[in-house]
Image (cartoon, helix red, strand yellow):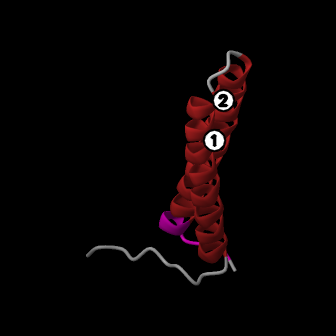
């Protein structure tokens, strides 16, 4: 079950976007910990909400990449 080049590119792009969101979320959690250390719990909570949103989106993008691999999502060529 080889994928076409456009579908390989789509899968790669989805995985890269998911990875970027993952590490951005990790960075936000690190900054949130710093906020807590200086007593800004409100700011920390807001950053954690954003990071959790990133994680949810990361999971969706990874699932889409899996669907591309399984050929349930196909990138059509424009003619």
> Residue 26, percent across and down?
70, 36
Q: Is residue 6 above or below residue 50?
A: below
Residue 15: % across, % down: 62, 55
User: Residue at 58% across / 37% down in the picture?
Assistant: 47
**Which residue occupies 64% across, 30% down?**
41
Which of 75/51 is in front?
51
Q: Is residue 34 above or below residue 1?
A: above
- Identify the residue position indicated by label 2 in the image: 32
* 27 drawn magenta: no
Residue 25 appears in the rendering = yes
How far, Cα to Cα, is label 1 from label 2? Answer: 7 Å
Residue beneath the point at 64% across and 53% down: 55
- Bounds of the magenta span? 2-7
Q: Label 2 crowding class (10 Å Cα cut-off): few <14, some 14-19, many 20+?
A: many
**Residue 18 in view here:** no
> Which label belongs to residue 48?
1
Residue at 65% over, 22% down? 35
Task: Return the residue nearer the eye: 19 or 59.
Answer: 59
Q: Position of residue 16 (x, y in %)?
A: 59, 48
Q: Is residue 62 above or below residue 37?
A: below
């Amino acid at each position: 079950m080889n994928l076409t080049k456009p579908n390989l590119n789509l899968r790669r792009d989805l995985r890269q976007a998911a990875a970027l969101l993952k590490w951005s979320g990790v960075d936000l959690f690190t900054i949130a910990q710093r906020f807590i250390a200086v007593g800004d719990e409100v700011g920390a909570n807001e950053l954690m909400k954003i990071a959790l949103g990133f994680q949810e989106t990361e999971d969706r993008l990874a699932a889409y990449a899996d669907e591309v691999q399984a050929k349930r999502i196909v990138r059509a060529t424009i003619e």
